[in-house]
Amino acid sequence: MISEFQDLSDKIDQLAEMTAALRRENAQLRQANAALVAENMGYQRRLGEASGRLEALLGSIPGLESVDTDDKLPENEDAQ
């Protein structure tokens, strides 16, 4: 009977240790996740800035508005 109680006590100790380890791991994962979220926000900001600069550059190219992006190629080779 005492042996069974000792086994149960050992299992409870193991469960407590595993719970503590999982709590520590969870805290570490939350910190890592927060760091990645902050890093992602920084990348999104930089991407937005780059997009704005690119749009400004494209807007400053003279005559770009009148050029079609498909370049209107002929339908067949005989048309050339």
Image (tube, grey):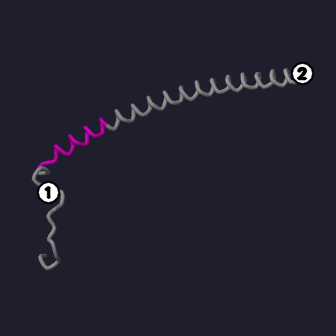
Q: Is residue 53 magenta?
A: yes
Location of the N terminus (image quadrant): top right
Label 2, residues with CA under 10 Å away: few <14, some 14-19, many ≥20: few
- Foreground label between 1 and 2: 2
In the image, residue 63 lies at what x, y percent? 11, 51
Q: Give the main secondary structure of the magenta stretch.
A: helix
Question: Looking at numbered disc 2 in the image, what kind of residue is underneath it?
Answer: Met
Q: Which mark is residue 68?
A: 1
Q: Would you say 50 lies left or right of 2 here? A: left
Q: Residue furthest bottom?
A: 78
Q: Which mark is residue 60?
A: none
- The image quarter containing residue 20 is top right
Q: In the rendered view, would you say 75 is above or below 54?
A: below
Q: Tell me whether the residue at label 1 lies in contact with that at label 2, contact meaning CB atoms closer than 8 angstroms.
A: no
Label 1, residues with CA under 10 Å away: few <14, some 14-19, many ≥20: few
Helix, strand or loop for disc 1: loop
33 and 5: which is toward the camera: 5
Q: In the rendered view, would you say 6 is above or below 80?
A: above
Question: Looking at numbered disc 1 in the image, what kind of residue is underneath it?
Answer: Asp
47 and 9: which is toward the camera: 9
Helix, strand or loop for disc 2: loop
- Residue beneath label 2, please? 1
Q: Which residues are magenta?
A: 48-62
Residue at horizontal 80%, vertical 23%?
8
